[in-house]
Image (tube, grey):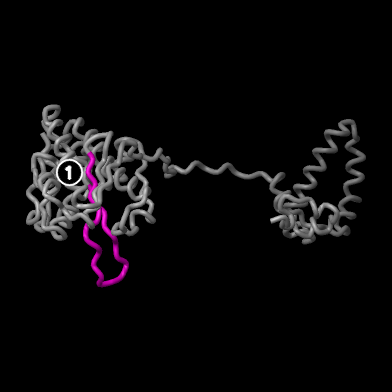
Amino acid sequence: MNSREPGVGSNDFSSSPSLAFSSVPDWGEPLTEQELEAIDAIEATFLSASTPSASSAIKEQDSSAQDDQASKRPCRRLPSSMLDLFTPFPLSPCKADVKMRYPAIKFGGRISYTRTSVEVEKAARELLRSLEAKRGESDLVAVGFDIEWKPTFRKGVPPGKAAVMQLCADIGQCYVMHIFHSGIPPSLRLLLQDSTLVKVGVGIDNDCVKVFKDYNVSVLGVGDLSCLANQKLGGEPRNWSLKALTEMLVSKELPKPNKIRLGNWEVKSLSKQQLQYAATDAFASWQLHQVLKELADTDNSLRNETSEEVKAAVPPRVSYP
């Protein structure tokens, strides 16, 4: 577009001073006492600096005449932008509740995305082999676990079934399985029902109940990170969110854009943004577990209670040594 909007990157109005002044807010309105005092102070400062030898007697003689003239002359209100340059202003106090923004946490490894039954079965077998190899390295093998589903915003309409399951056990690879299309094939079922492989996450009990209701598969051997955080961090027990724990333990911000979080997880193929979101959630759960398990218990009596509904779907969660 070749035309330019008036006043944007243009000096077209420079030839018309009246136009420039008419665009200034409050121009032409009477001056207030505060504005007059500010102008007088500026003039006095200028005069004292430019004519330091001026006689005080002459100033006294002229002052009364100037006052009479000032009362008769028409006054114009200065624009607020000009007045602000001369009027003092208090310093704004620092706000104690200003929240520091942390860098975003992001999974930087390989995201293995599968959506057919054959693909998910193959990925689950691969993950099982990897977890078996880790048993010799640690007494407790943990897997970051999370699910996503399509929400509903209509009263009386239930949410969609669990559509995506994400699993992460290290910094190198995260598995995002589109179970809405694939279902839960045998190897994935075996992994979920192995109580020696600890699935960790925040609010994981509710996720396990949903998987059980939607697919009739129990998720065994679960560890709730909110419970573990209360056990390790002490103080008044809190209902931790994954986002809050991420900020507390690793000083990172967990992005939760509603456009993705509340989006359609039942689509034919997930977008790159959905894949990154899902993988990062599972990775964050695994990473926070790695941090928490290294901390000493502050109160071994702190344990998160499990609802009767959850107990019917999954066994008691893992007790951390």
Is-magenta flag for residue 98? no
Report the number of discs: 1
Placement of the N terminus among the 4 image quadrants: bottom right
Any part of residue 43 in sight: yes
Any part of residue 239 in sight: no
- Give the magenta-colored segment's residue range: 146-168
Q: Residue at x 35, y 44 (%)?
A: 254
Residue sitting nearer the eye, 238 or 223: 223
Vertical side of 23 occupied by 145: above or below = above
Task: Say what amino acid the circle numbered 1 marks.
Answer: Ala
> What x and y, as percent, mark residue 162?
22, 57
Query: Which residue is denoted by mark 1 in the rendering?
Result: 124
Vertical side of 215 occupied by 289: above or below = above
> What x and y, as percent, mark residue 22?
78, 60
Placement of the C terminus among the 4 image quadrants: top left
Q: Quadrant of residue 260?
A: bottom left
> What x and y, as percent, mark residue 219?
12, 49
Residue sitting nearer the eye, 127 or 194: 127
Q: Is residue 295 left or right of residue 217?
A: right
> What x and y, as percent, mark residue 295?
20, 31
Q: Is residue 6 left or right of residue 315?
A: right
Considering every residue shown, the one lying at the far bottom of the view is 156
Residue sitting nearer the eye, 23 or 222: 222
Q: Is residue 66 left or right of residue 153?
A: right
Residue sitting nearer the eye, 116 or 307: 116
